[in-house]
Structures are given as C-alpha cells and as structure tokens.
Image (spheres, grey):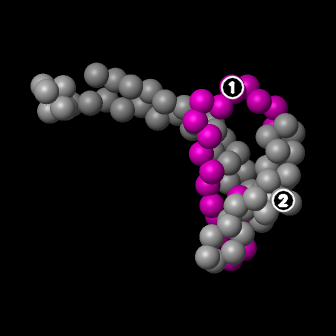
Amino acid sequence: MTTTSKILRLTFINAAGKKRNLNVPEAAEGLEAYTVKAAMEKMAQNNAFADENGDLYTAVDSAAYVERTVNSVFDNSEDK
C-alpha cells in the first residue's frame, strides 16, 4: 500500500542559533512566500514558543512544502 502526506515545514533559528522546524500538517497549498514569511516573523517576534533553553523560534530561516510517500512492503497490523 502506498500513502502520501504533505506538510508545510517552517524553519526558524532558535535562541542558541540552531535551526528548528515547525511542521504544519494539512496546510493550505499554494501559499505565497510573503504570506508565510509574514506569519513566521510574527511568531518569532511574539516569542510564542520556548523551552528550558530559551525561545525556540527567534528568527525566520525558510519554509517549504514537504511531500512524503511511503510504500509499505508488508504490515502485520493489517492481519489483526
């Protein structure tokens, strides 16, 4: 069986200067770059997400639609 899924991957730079991804499943397709970038900039400015190491998303890096296709060879769970 083949399954395909698509996400919008938003990549930010965190407080430590490392890349962090935020995956958005079922995102609208065909979003304009300026729309996505503006939304990401607001998220970074609001410091909406943090952990014990500081803010997770402090600067905008990139965004991309990522499509994943899985071709199952077998799956024992289908027998149950």
**Location of residue 60 with respect to 18 vertically, above or below:** above
Pick the front one: 21 or 46 = 46
Q: Give the quarter of the image for residue 73.
A: top left
Question: Which mark is in front, 1 or 2?
Answer: 2
Mark 1 crowdedness (10 Å alpha carbons): few <14, some 14-19, many ≥20: few
Residue at the spot 69% in from the left edge and 25% down from the top edge: 29
- State the extent of the magenta-drawn residues as a range: 12-33
Residue at the spot 18% in from the left edge and 26% down from the top edge: 78
Q: Position of residue 40 (x, y in %)?
A: 79, 49
Q: Give the quarter of the image for residue 56.
A: bottom right
Q: Which residue position holds label 1? A: 29
Label 2: state its secondary structure. Answer: loop
Q: Disc 2 residue type?
A: Asn
Pick the front one: 69 or 50 = 50
The alpha-carbon separation of the residues under discs 1 and 2 comes to: 25 Å
- Is residue 17 visible in the rendered image? The answer is no
